[in-house]
């Protein structure tokens, strides 16, 4: 099922990337075009002191200035109008939007996800119909190799997708699966499939069609389309879409190619000779060296391939979209941008002038990186909220084997967080809320998988800053997984309102405050098995 190489004559769907001269070059070589045209409109002067009395209240632009100055040095970005971002709410709304975009596709569809559910025949049919209707349409899919082949030789994500290549040919359809360089040798042979994902995954969720893209934390399976709550933002921006298409192209060139096969598994996984690096299973060190060379320029604001196609007048662009990524396992040294961007934003909130700001942080799997917890609890902000899944809304609730211990592990981590809040005297400023809509395994139950951050500035009702994407904000996200996100910084009142509605809507119906007293109850106690399992995973180099 796993072949070492495939001839260079095998077609690869590499979109050419045009530089300023019109010469086609690879994403890693096309640096900086259009970056100088980005127009920063957040002025520092509004925050300046007055010599004749107390300083006037800061304008929205003045309050945002300390954030964007450093963000411009951390990550590449585009300026767009706030109306170019649509906030979707429900799994059904996300699924219908995705199918509608696919049906209307003219040139390209590119999808990055952890996995596509092995029984997602409706989605596959939608892709087939679009490809049949438009002979020029091309499809590129990137998933994770561990998750995408876990059930093989039984039906799997890989066996679901391979027939697309058989029907439409490798000239039009490319299926790629990324394999972490951290799981090789004895680890790969002996760690059970159900938990080997703890050593690193392709975790990006990029759903691009032509010149629009949905960024989300949702994967492509039936629960994410029906009863697994996440977040979903649709960006109608050729610039943002093209950037993330380049990201997917780069990671695809570091991934296995999936081809149809006449075998029980239904597919074979090969490493093309013209990939950008040797296989991570054969030479992980050289793989990381080559991946660093490929990706470092793509995520740096100084060298990222940014070309502006937006026709919106510069003076109407009121929203910056920072393109932040976490590729720690592929970069040495690690120059990822997500954690530095979030670190800067939260450090800025620790300044006295942001004492009347507030933040809302959510993660379905509550295990924020220790540095992130420290930053959240060190801000000057008030009325802060953390939203996480109740054990009964955790997708692993009631699962057999080791994975069934995970809800208890996240409960233990949430309890530690609440204790830390109390130890710092922050009970009146920071609240933990658990999201629950039924109980997993019972009729009508939902699970919670949303993740993100919203920041509301002093004197405002709604957020001016939010981050959307795949990251779970854990130690694992910042060391093992591949993540792609957008940090939105906006002065657009309508977009601010919609971001505010999003964060309130996630809390209104299905959350309740959880206190230290709640965690002290008998039913909340975590057994020794959970603690031992957490310790073993950490000792073996994995992470939750």
Image (tube, helix red, strand yellow):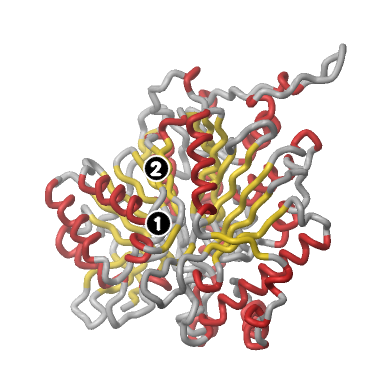
Give the residue at the far right of this rendering: 52
Q: In the visual, does 271 lie left or right of 447? A: left
Give the residue at the far top of this rendering: 52
Check disc 2 and report the residue beneath it: 234
Rendered residue at 40%/46% (across/down):
88
Residue 268, how many percent across, how many down? 28, 74
The reply to whether dot 2 and dot 1 touch (C-beta < 8 Å) is: no
User: Where, by quadrant of the figure, is residue 252 drawn?
Assistant: bottom left
Instruction: Please count the marks in the image.
Output: 2
The C terminus lies in quadrant: bottom right
Residue 212, how many percent across, how many down? 35, 40
Rendered residue at 77%/57% (across/down):
427
Check disc 1 and report the residue beneath it: 253
Q: Is residue 460 above or below residue 219?
A: above
Residue 225, how many percent across, how many down? 34, 60
Q: In the visual, does 157 lie left or right of 205? A: left
Rendered residue at 65%/46% (across/down):
359
Query: Callout 1: helix, strand or loop?
Result: loop
- Mark 2: give few (<14), some (14-19) or many (20+) Cα within 10 Å: many
The N terminus lies in quadrant: bottom left
Q: Is residue 407 above or below residue 292?
A: below
- Mark 1: give few (<14), some (14-19) or many (20+) Cα within 10 Å: many
**Is tag 2's residue or tag 1's residue first in the polypeptide sequence?**
2
Query: Callout 2: helix, strand or loop?
Result: strand
Q: Is residue 391 above or below residue 398?
A: above
């Amino acid at each position: 099922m796993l072949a070492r190489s495939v001839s260079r004559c095998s077609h690869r769907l590499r979109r050419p990337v045009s530089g300023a001269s019109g010469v086609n070059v690879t994403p890693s070589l096309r640096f900086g075009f259009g970056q100088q045209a980005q127009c920063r409109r957040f002025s520092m002067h509004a925050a300046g002191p007055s010599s004749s009395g107390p300083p006037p209240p800061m304008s929205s632009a003045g309050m945002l200035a300390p954030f964007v100055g450093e963000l411009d040095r951390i990550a590449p970005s585009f300026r767009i109008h706030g109306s170019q971002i649509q906030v979707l709410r429900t799994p059904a709304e996300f699924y219908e939007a995705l199918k509608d975009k696919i049906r209307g596709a003219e040139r390209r569809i590119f999808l990055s996800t952890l996995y596509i559910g092995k029984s997602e025949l409706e989605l596959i049919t939608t892709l087939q119909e679009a490809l049949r209707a438009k002979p020029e349409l091309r499809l590129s899919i990137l998933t994770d190799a561990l998750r995408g082949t876990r059930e093989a030789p039984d039906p799997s994500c890989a066996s679901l997708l391979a027939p697309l290549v058989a029907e439409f040919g490798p000239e039009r359809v490319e299926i790629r699966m990324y394999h972490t360089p951290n799981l090789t040798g004895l680890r790969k042979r002996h760690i059970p499939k159900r938990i080997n994902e703890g050593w690193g995954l392709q975790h990006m969720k990029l759903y691009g069609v032509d010149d629009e893209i949905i960024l989300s934390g949702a994967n492509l399976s039936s629960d994410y389309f029906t009863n697994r709550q996440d977040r979903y933002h649709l960006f109608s921006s050729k610039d943002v879409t093209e950037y993330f298409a380049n990201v997917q192209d780069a990671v695809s060139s570091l991934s296995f190619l999936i081809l149809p096969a006449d075998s029980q598994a239904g597919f074979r996984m090969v490493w093309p000779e013209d990939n950008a690096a040797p296989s991570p299973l054969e030479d992980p060190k050289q793989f990381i060296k080559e991946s660093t060379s490929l990706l470092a320029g793509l995520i740096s604001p100084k060298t990222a391939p940014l070309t502006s196609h937006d026709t919106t007048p510069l003076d109407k662009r009121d929203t910056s979209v920072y393109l932040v990524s976490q590729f720690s396992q592929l970069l040495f040294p690690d120059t990822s941008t997500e954690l530095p961007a979030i670190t800067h934003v939260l450090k800025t909130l620790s300044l006295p002038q942001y004492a009347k700001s507030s933040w809302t942080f959510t993660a379905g799997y509550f295990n924020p990186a220790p540095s992130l917890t420290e930053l959240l609890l060190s801000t000057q902000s008030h009325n802060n909220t953390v939203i996480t899944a109740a054990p009964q809304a955790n997708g692993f609730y009631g699962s057999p084997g080791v994975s069934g211990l995970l809800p208890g592990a996240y409960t233990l981590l949430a309890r530690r967080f609440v204790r830390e809040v109390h130890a710092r005297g922050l009970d009146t400023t920071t609240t933990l809320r658990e999201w629950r809509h039924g109980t997993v395994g019972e009729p009508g139950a939902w699970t919670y998988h949303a993740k993100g951050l919203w920041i509301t500035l002093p004197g405002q009702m709604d957020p001016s800053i939010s981050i959307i994407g795949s990251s779970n904000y854990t130690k694992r996200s910042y060391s093992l997984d591949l993540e792609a996100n957008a940090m939105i910084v906006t002065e657009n009142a309508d977009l601010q309102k919609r971001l505010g509605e999003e964060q309130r809507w996630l809390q209104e119906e299905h959350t309740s405050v959880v206190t230290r007293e709640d965690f002290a109850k008998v039913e909340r106690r975590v057994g020794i098995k959970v603690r031992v399992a957490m310790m073993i995973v950490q000792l073996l180099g994995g992470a939750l």
